[in-house]
C-alpha cells in the first residue's frame, strides 16, 4: 500500500502544479465528473444524495401505508398493493437509504480521519456506488411488471415468495446487486483502514467512527453472501424445480428464515455500529471532553459484533423450536444488553461534567441516545421468549425496530450530516432551522411510533391493511405523526440546499471540541485532494 | 390581522384533533389483553416485572444525562473536566447489568419450560392455515371427528365502507372453535399453502402454521367467553382478513355442543350420489364461491390478473369440464390456487364449478354432477 501513498507524495512545488488541473474535481466536468470519479469525496457525496432520495421514496411508501391505516376499512389501496408498499418500504429504507448513508459517511470521513489520501481501491469504489442506482431501478421497475412488486414483506419469507410474479425475480436480482455493492465497499473500507492510516496511528488510536466501520465491514463480508445465497435458493425454487424451502421435495420453509436472520440480525448492527461511531464522535465534541472509555467502547463493539452472530433465531421464537433452542437464543440475546449498556453508560459518562452546548448535531446525538436506549429496552422485553410469543409479528415489534432504526440510525445520520456539512461544503447550515428540524423530527417520531407499542400490546398484527375497531384511535394518531414526520424531512432538504447555496462561510473549525484529523489538520472546506502526504501525529 | 394565521392554525389543529378523537368511543387499549389462563397471567407478570426494571434503569441513566444537560452546560459557565477511563466504574457497569439479566432470565426460563410442555392433553385439535381461512379438526378427546372450516364473517360491504362496521369488525367468523373450560387443549398447527400463524393472546398461545410440518402448543382456558384474534404471519393478499375466534364453554355446554355439531354435520352431509338440477347447483355454488373463491377471483369473476386470473370468459372455465374439475381438485402449484379437493366435498365442488360455468357472461348451460367430480378424484 505504500505505493499508493508514495505516488501522491510529490514534493511541494510539483504538488502545486498538480493541483491546478484537478483542484476541485477530476479531469471531467458536468455529469461525466460523477460517472467517472474515483475521488472518495465525490463518491461519498453521491452515496449521501442517493440515500436521501431513497429515503424520500421509501418515506412516501410509508405514508401510503399510514394513510390506508388512518381509519378502519379499505379506502385508498387494495390489500395486494398494501403488501407491496410494505415490502418495498422495508427494502428501500434498509438497503437504499440507511446503509448507503453510512457508506457515504465512511467514504467522506475514513480517509480524512486516518490521514489517507483516498480509499484503497478508487475505481472499485466508483463501481460499488454505481451498482446502487441499478439495484434501486430494479426495485422500482418491479411495480410495473405483471403482478406488481412482491407483497411478501422485506424479509421475503418462503414459500409466499414462490407465489409472486416476475417482480419477485427483479427484487432478487436487486438484492444481489446491493449485496455486491456492500461486499466491494467493505473490502475497500477494510483495506483502507488496515493499510492506509497515517504511519503513527496505531489501531487503538483510530477514531471510534473508524473502528465501528472496520467491524461493520467484516459483518457485511460475513453475512451478505448468506443473504445472496438465500435469495438465490428462492430463485431456483421459483424457476428451476428445486425444493429448498418446500416440504414436498424434502425442503423446509423455516430453513429460509434461519438463513435470512443469520444475515438479518448482524444487519441490525451493520446499521447500528456506524451510527454508534457517529455519536461517539459528536458527543465528545459538544461535551468538550474526551470519550470516557475509548478502550471499553472498542471492546464493546467487538462484543456486540460477536453476539450478533449467535442470536438470529430470536426472530423466530414462534416457528416451533425445541425448548433448548429457545433458551439458548434467549440467553444469548439478553447478553447483548451488556456491551450495549457499556456504550450507553460511556456516552452519558462522557457528557458528565463536560461543558455542554446543544447545536443541532448534539441534539440529534442526544435524541439518538435517549430513543435508541428506549428501543434497546423494548428489545430486552422482546428477547424474553414468553413475552415475545405474545408480541411477535405485532405492532410492538414495528415500534421496537423503528426506535432502533429511525431514532437510532437515522438520528445518528442527521447528527453526522449537520456535524460534517461545514467540512464538506465550507458553509454553515442555519442553526435555528436545524434545531426546528430536530424538534419536529423528535416530536413526530414519537407521535408516530410510541403509540404503536400500545397497538402491539393490545394485539394488532403487523402487515395488515385493515384492522378491528378497537385499534382505531392509536392508528389515527400514528398516521398524523407519520405525515408530520414526512413533511419535517422536506425542511431538512431545504436546510441543506440553503446551506450549500447561501450558507455562511464556515470557519476552519466551527466545533470547539472537534479533535479528529479532518478538523485539526485540514482546511475547511476539505480540499479535493487531502493528505497527499501522510500527517505526522 | 396578526392573529389571523394564529387563528387558522388553531382551526386546523382543532380539525385534526377532532378527526383523531372522533372514533374514541371504545376505551384506549394500551396493555396486553386480559389473561384468560394461568400461562397468559404468568406472561403478563413477567412483562410487568421486566417493564418495571427497565423503567427504573431508564429513569436512572437518563436522570444522569439530563442532569448533565442541565448542570454541566457551557452557557452556565461549566468548565469541562478531562477525566476518562475508570476501571472500577467500568467493571461495575458491566457486571451489574449482567446480574440484573440473570434476575430476569431466571423467571423467564420457568415460563418457557412450562409453555413448551404439551404433554397429556385432554383434547387435541389440528389447526390448518389456508389462504385465507382456518380449518379445525378435532383429533382426540371429546368431539373427535368434528371438522370444519372457519372463515371471516364480516360482510365485504363493511370492509369496503358501504355499510356501517359491526362491533366485532374483522374479528368474527362463521364457525367458532369451541373448547371446554379448565381442560388442557393441545393444538397442532400446519398449513396447506404458505406460512400462517395461529394466535390467541388471552391464553398466551401463538404458533406458526408451516406447510408440510406439524408444530404444537397448548392452552388451558380458565374463563368462559368468546376470545378473538387474527392470523399474525403475512400470508398474502387477504392476510388481514382471517380471524381466529375461540369460544370457551363449560363442560356441560361443551358436551351439548359436540352432540349438536355431530348431528348437524351428519345432517348437512350431502348426498353425492343424487342427480342435482342446474338451479340447485347454481344456488349452492354461489354460496361456496362467496366463501372460498371471491377473495381472489372477485364477485365480478374478473379476478386481479395476473396473480388471480379471471373466470369470466376464461378458457379453462369455458373449455372441457375435466380440465377445470382437475384444476379445482388439485390446485395449481406455486400459486394461491389451492387443492380444494381436500377442503370441499363433491357436491360443493360440483356446485361451484357449475356456478362458474353458468354465471357472468359464461353461458355453457352445462351441469357438473357430484359423480363427475368423484370420477376425477
Image: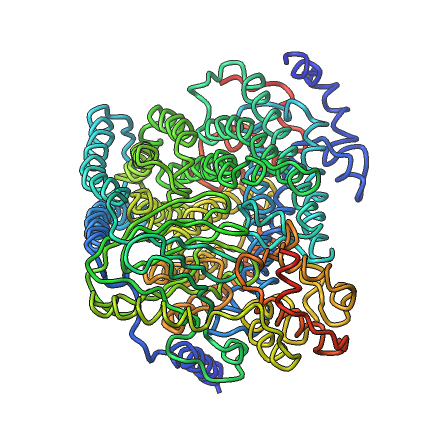
* A14 displayed left or right of A294: right
Question: Going 46% across and 39% down the picture, which residue do you hit?
Answer: A268
* B292 displayed left or right of B41: right
- Viewer-nearest residue: B322 or B119: B322
Q: Residue furthest bottom?
A: B1
Question: Going 57% across and 32% down the picture, which residue do you hit?
Answer: A224
Look at the image and tell me in which quarter the C terminus of chain B lies. Answer: bottom right
Up the image or down, A64 lies above or below B165; here it is: above
- Viewer-nearest residue: B71 or B47: B47
Which image quadrant for residue A454?
bottom left
Which image quadrant for residue B246?
bottom left
- Viewer-nearest residue: B184 or A24: B184
- Viewer-nearest residue: B176 or A120: B176
Residue B41 appears at what percent x and percent y?
20, 55
Residue B60 appears at what percent x and percent y?
21, 46
Residue B202 appears at what percent x and percent y?
28, 60
Amino acid at each position: 500500500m505504500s505505493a499508493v501513498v508514495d505516488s501522491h507524495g510529490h514534493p511541494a512545488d510539483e504538488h502545486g502544479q498538480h493541483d491546478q488541473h484537478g483542484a476541485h474535481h477530476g479531469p471531467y466536468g458536468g455529469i461525466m465528473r460523477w460517472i467517472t470519479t474515483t475521488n472518495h469525496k465525490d463518491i461519498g457525496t453521491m452515496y449521501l444524495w442517493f440515500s436521501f432520495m431513497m429515503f424520500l421514496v421509501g418515506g412516501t411508501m410509508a405514508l401510503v401505508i399510514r394513510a390506508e391505516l388512518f381509519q378502519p376499512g379499505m379506502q385508498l389501496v387494495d390489500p395486494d398493493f398494501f403488501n407491496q408498499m410494505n415490502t418495498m418500504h422495508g427494502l428501500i429504507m434498509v438497503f437504499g437509504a440507511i446503509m448507503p448513508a453510512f457508506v457515504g459517511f465512511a467514504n467522506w470521513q475514513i480517509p480524512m480521519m486516518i490521514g489517507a489520501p483516498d480509499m484503497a481501491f478508487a475505481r472499485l469504489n466508483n463501481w460499488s456506488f454505481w451498482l446502487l442506482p441499478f439495484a434501486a431501478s430494479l426495485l422500482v421497475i418491479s411495480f410495473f411488471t405483471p403482478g406488481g412488486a412482491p407483497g411478501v414483506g422485506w424479509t421475503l419469507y418462503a414459500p409466499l415468495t414462490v407465489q409472486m410474479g416476475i417482480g419477485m425475480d427483479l427484487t432478487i436480482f436487486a438484492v444481489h446487486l446491493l449485496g455486491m455493492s456492500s461486499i466491494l465497499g467493505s473490502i475497500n473500507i477494510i483495506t483502507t483502514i488496515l493499510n492506509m492510516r497515517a504511519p503513527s496511528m496505531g489501531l487503538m488510536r483510530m477514531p471510534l467512527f473508524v473502528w465501528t466501520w472496520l467491524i461493520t465491514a467484516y459483518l457485511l463480508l460475513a453475512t451478505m453472501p448468506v443473504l445472496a445465497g438465500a435469495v438465490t435458493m428462492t430463485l431456483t425454487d421459483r424457476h428451476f424445480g428445486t425444493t429448498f424451502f418446500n416440504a414436498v421435495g424434502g425442503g423446509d420453509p423455516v430453513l429460509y428464515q434461519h438463513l435470512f436472520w443469520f444475515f438479518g440480525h448482524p444487519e441490525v448492527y451493520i446499521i447500528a455500529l456506524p451510527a454508534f461511531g457517529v455519536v461517539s464522535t459528536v458527543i465528545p465534541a459538544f461535551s468538550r471532553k474526551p470519550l470516557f472509555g475509548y478502550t471499553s467502547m472498542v471492546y464493546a463493539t467487538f462484543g456486540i459484533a460477536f453476539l450478533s452472530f449467535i442470536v438470529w433465531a430470536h426472530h423466530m421464537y414462534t416457528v416451533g423450536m425445541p425448548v433448548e433452542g429457545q433458551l439458548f437464543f434467549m440467553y444469548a440475546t439478553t447478553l447483548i444488553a451488556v456491551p450495549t449498556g457499556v456504550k450507553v453508560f460511556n456516552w452519558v459518562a462522557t457528557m458528565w461534567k463536560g461543558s455542554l452546548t446543544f447545536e443541532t448535531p448534539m441534539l440529534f446525538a442526544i435524541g439518538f441516545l435517549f430513543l435508541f436506549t428506549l428501543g434497546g429496552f423494548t428489545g430486552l422485553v422482546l428477547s424474553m421468549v414468553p413475552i415475545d410469543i405474545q408480541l411477535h409479528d405485532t405492532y410492538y415489534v414495528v415500534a421496537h425496530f423503528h426506535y432502533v432504526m429511525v431514532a437510532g440510525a437515522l438520528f445518528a445520520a442527521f447528527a453526522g450530516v449537520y456535524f460534517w456539512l461545514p467540512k464538506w461544503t465550507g458553509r454553515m447550515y442555519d442553526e435555528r432551522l436545524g434545531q426546528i428540524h430536530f424538534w419536529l423530527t423528535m416530536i413526530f417520531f414519537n407521535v408516530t411510533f410510541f403509540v404503536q407499542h400500545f397497538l402491539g400490546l393490545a394485539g394488532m398484527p403487523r402487515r395488515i391493511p385493515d384492522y378491528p375497531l378497537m385499534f382505531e384511535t392509536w392508528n389515527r394518531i400514528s398516521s398524523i405523526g407519520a405525515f408530520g414526520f414526512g413533511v419535517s424531512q422536506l425542511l431538512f432538504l431545504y436546510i441543506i440546499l440553503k446551506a450549500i447555496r447561501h450558507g455562511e462561510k464556515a470557519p476552519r473549525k466551527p466545533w470547539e471540541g472537534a479533535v479528529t484529523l479532518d478538523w485539526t489538520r485540514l482546511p475547511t472546506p476539505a480540499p479535493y485532494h487531502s493528505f497527499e502526504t501522510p500527517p505526522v501525529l | 390581522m396578526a392573529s389571523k394565521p394564529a387563528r387558522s392554525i388553531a382551526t386546523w389543529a382543532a380539525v385534526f384533533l377532532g378527526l383523531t378523537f372522533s372514533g374514541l368511543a371504545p376505551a384506549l387499549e394500551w396493555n396486553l389483553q386480559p389473561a384468560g389462563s394461568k400461562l397468559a397471567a404468568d406472561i403478563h407478570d413477567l412483562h410487568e416485572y421486566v417493564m418495571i426494571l427497565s423503567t427504573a434503569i431508564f429513569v436512572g441513566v437518563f436522570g444522569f444525562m439530563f442532569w448533565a444537560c442541565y448542570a454541566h452546560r457551557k452557557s452556565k459557565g461549566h468548565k469541562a473536566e478531562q477525566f476518562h477511563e475508570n476501571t472500577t466504574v467500568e467493571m461495575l457497569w458491566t457486571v451489574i447489568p449482567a446480574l440484573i439479566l440473570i434476575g430476569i432470565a431466571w423467571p423467564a426460563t420457568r415460563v418457557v419450560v412450562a409453555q413448551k410442555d404439551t404433554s397429556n392433553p385432554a383434547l387435541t385439535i389440528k389447526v390448518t392455515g389456508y389462504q385465507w381461512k382456518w380449518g379445525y379438526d378435532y383429533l382426540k378427546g371429546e368431539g373427535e371427528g368434528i371438522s370444519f372450516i372457519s372463515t371471516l364473517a364480516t360482510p365485504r360491504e363493511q370492509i369496503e365502507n358501504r355499510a356501517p362496521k359491526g362491533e366485532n369488525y374483522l374479528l368474527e367468523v362463521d364457525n367458532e372453535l369451541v373448547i371446554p373450560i379448565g381442560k388442557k387443549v393441545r393444538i397442532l398447527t400446519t398449513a396447506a399453502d404458505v406460512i400462517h400463524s395461529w394466535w390467541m393472546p388471552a391464553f398466551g398461545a401463538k404458533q406458526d402454521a408451516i406447510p408440510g410440518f406439524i408444530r404444537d402448543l397448548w392452552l388451558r382456558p380458565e374463563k368462559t367467553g368468546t376470545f378473538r384474534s387474527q392470523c399474525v404471519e403475512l400470508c398474502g393478499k387477504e392476510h388481514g382478513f382471517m380471524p381466529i375466534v375461540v369460544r370457551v364453554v363449560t363442560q356441560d355446554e361443551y358436551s351439548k355442543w359436540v352432540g349438536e355439531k355431530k348431528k348437524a354435520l351428519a345432517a348437512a352431509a350431502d348426498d353425492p350420489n343424487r342427480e342435482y338440477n342446474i338451479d340447485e347447483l347454481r344456488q349452492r355454488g354461489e354460496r361456496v364461491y362467496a366463501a372460498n373463491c371471491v377473495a381472489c377471483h372477485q364477485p365480478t369473476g374478473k379476478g386481479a390478473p395476473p396473480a388471480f386470473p379471471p373466470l369470466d370468459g376464461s378458457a379453462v372455465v369455458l373449455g372441457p369440464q375435466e380440465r377445470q374439475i382437475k384444476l379445482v381438485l388439485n390446485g395449481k402449484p406455486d400459486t394461491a390456487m389451492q387443492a380444494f379437493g381436500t377442503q370441499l366435498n363433491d357436491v360443493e365442488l360440483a356446485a361451484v364449478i357449475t356456478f362458474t360455468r353458468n354465471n357472468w357472461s359464461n353461458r355453457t348451460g352445462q351441469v357438473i354432477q357430484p359423480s363427475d367430480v368423484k370420477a376425477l378424484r
